[in-house]
Image (cartoon, helix red, strand yellow):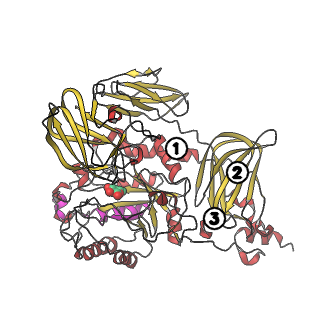
Amino acid sequence: MNLRPIAAALCAAGIAASCGTPAPEPFGALPTPEQLAWQRMETNMFVHFGPNTFTSAEWGDGREHPDVFAPSDLDCRQWAAIARDAGMKGIVITAKHHDGFCLWPNPASDHTVARSAWRDGKGDVLRELSDACREAGLGFGVYISPWDRNDPAYGTDAYNDVFRRTLESALGDYGEVFEQWFDGACGEGPNGKRQVYDWDLYLSTVFRLQPQAVVFGDGGPGCRWIGNERGIAGRTCWSTFDPDGVLPGGARSLDTLNCGNVRGSHWVPGEADVSIRPGWFYRESEDAQVKSLAELLKIYYASVGRNALLLLNVPPDKRGRIAAVDSLRLREFRAALDRIFAEDLAAGAAAEASNVRGGSRRFAAAQLLDDEYDTYWAADDTVRRASVTLRFDAPRRFNRVLLQEYIPLGQRVARFRIEALRPDGSWRTIARETTIGYKRIVLTETVATEAVRLTIDEALASPVLNRFALYMDEVTIDPPHAERDKQGRIVLRTDVPQGEIRYTLDGSLPGRESALYAGPVVEPGPCRLRAAVFAGDKTSSVAEWSWDIAPAAFRAVAPAGAEAVVDGLSDDGAEPVTRGVVLPAGEAVTLDLGAPLTLAGFFYEPLAEGRGGCVVRYDLLASGDGAAWKTVCDGAAFDNIVNNPGRREVRFEAPLRTRYLRFVPRETSFAAGCGIGELGVLTR
Ligand code: FUL
């Protein structure tokens, strides 16, 4: 009897004992089974819900009356159904945000749903959501903010025990929790309360009650913050990390969080959190700013496609339901991903590797082509450079290359490139990248080729990969970008020419009959522009902008050189800074609006990605003549601006008639000063 086919089948099934060649030894820090299961969830839903949903605040101050929390039609099953249909595998809810309000009757606190008129104090969002998640087959996760602006004990030792009891209640009464989320934010400011958090106590409490939970914190221990709230992981992204001394909210390097540490001592994979809207909480005024399909795909490629888990925030509205715009966008997102990843264009290829571990079929390059997670291609222990070539019988067209390392054996690849075969038999490099990790999706130009080659140029240990797949993304048609300058000239453009841009200025949706963009459009008054790209039978999502009056007549009278803060243009991140200023500490900006105007508010925009530092707290003064000043805002704060540096609009309590404004930074995220991309007014 010929036993070879049986042995080969056993080998393919991963039964090592029957094969001569042993599997590679694990390398470096490794994921726990829970971290591996967590990473394989890939996309989860974040839910910010609480008093801020009703007050429109980004950070509640803890003085909100519990009756403020009054969802008229709470439906956690709707959230779960939307998450599941979007392909997400779990939901993490803000059980207690910085305002201290608990969405469950927490016996350790007086500031909870039990004190609210909502459902006569009998409501319990955690109960309803945990049940809904279980029914929908989703993981249930809990965000609890250590920073608490309500609890009277905050800032004293006694708070540590309050927090322990809070954890015990949230984690003890609602079944299994897959992720515990510790927010590192604290906006107390230099004169605020100082709490020394007892992390040993908190973590031991979590693990006693939920030993399987993956704990999110700035530096882990279960998974780490990716270092920004834009959902973008580093192009180099190690799941290995040196967490020593990195405590939530403590000193940490955002770049290190973004990229991890090569040969890091612990396995602390990145989690990329981002909101589908500009803010973390629902605001009706942001309904038109739900991220476009193109933006969501970009985020997906830069998070899941760069070895991170995507935690996408979809905040329910005042009813306690996810609004139709958000849920429709999630459907589009899921449908787009399903279309892009429906067909693996590498299927049926002949796969050949420069080295196969022990020459064994069990570790052959063909193992890269199936979607069995636990079968993989591996090289001999001494190998650090290797290549895998896929050959097709006819040219294949693709623009996405998906690679996966078999991370139960560690993250190993440090540098690789992808090449396509030219008709003349030479190879052309189409991508050079660094890390792979659990999953890497490399974006390339559209290539048609009969062979594609992955070359690993550097690895910390012999490479072990379980997936090499090719896809074609024909979905992404980016909507246009728009900019309006000082004079009100609006320029529309796309990164790559993909079709015609059509727009409207009357609030209607742009269609194929709308005005064709052929050059700058001048509109110096308050206006709303909507535009989309039309290419053949495809359309991008609709992008939308609202501008107030163009700052044509505005001047920055001080300091010298600050004109760029009223040029109408957002900072573009270029060096040196030309579209804004880096203001030295102690300076203020004075604007002359050219004539008295009646203002409903003003806005501040930091420099791109908060470079130069952000203004955290400020004063705003107004003057009719530039000589006598009155205070309009006194030490007001831009909530969460350091983690999420973007434009902040401030509305005054009453209309303000003024010609001069003075913006005085009082507290900044960098001691040396702050960046100002743009300052402007709201007249409506
Ligand atoms: C930050 C918080 O301050 C924001 O409000 C939000 O919850 C975000 C996810 O984390 O640190």
**Which three-letter amino acid code belongs to the residue tagged 3?**
Arg
Q: Residue 62: name its quadrant.
A: bottom left
Q: Is residue 512 above or below residue 106?
A: above
What residue is shown at x 59% (from left), y 54% (from top)? Answer: 440
**Which three-letter amino acid code belongs to the residue tagged 2?**
Ala
Identify the residue position indicated by label 2 in the image: 347
What residue is shown at x 73% (from left), y 75% (from top)? Answer: 22
Q: Residues within 10 Å of mark 3 (few under 14, many from 20)?
A: many
Q: Is residue 163 above or below residue 129?
A: below
Identify the residue position indicated by label 1 in the image: 336
Q: Is mark 3 within 8 Å of ligand 1?
A: no
- Which quarter shows the C terminus? top left
Identify the residue position indicated by label 3 in the image: 412
Q: Residues within 10 Å of mark 1 (few under 14, many from 20)?
A: some
Q: Earlier in the sequence, mark 3 or mark 2?
A: 2
Estimate the spatial distance between the alpha carbons at disc 3 and disc 2, rounded to whole Å: 25 Å
Looking at the rendering, the stretch of residues picked out in magenta corresponds to 117-146
Secondary structure at badge 2 equals loop
Q: Tell which quarter ligand 1 is in.
A: bottom left
**At which x and y percent is residue 595?**
20, 25
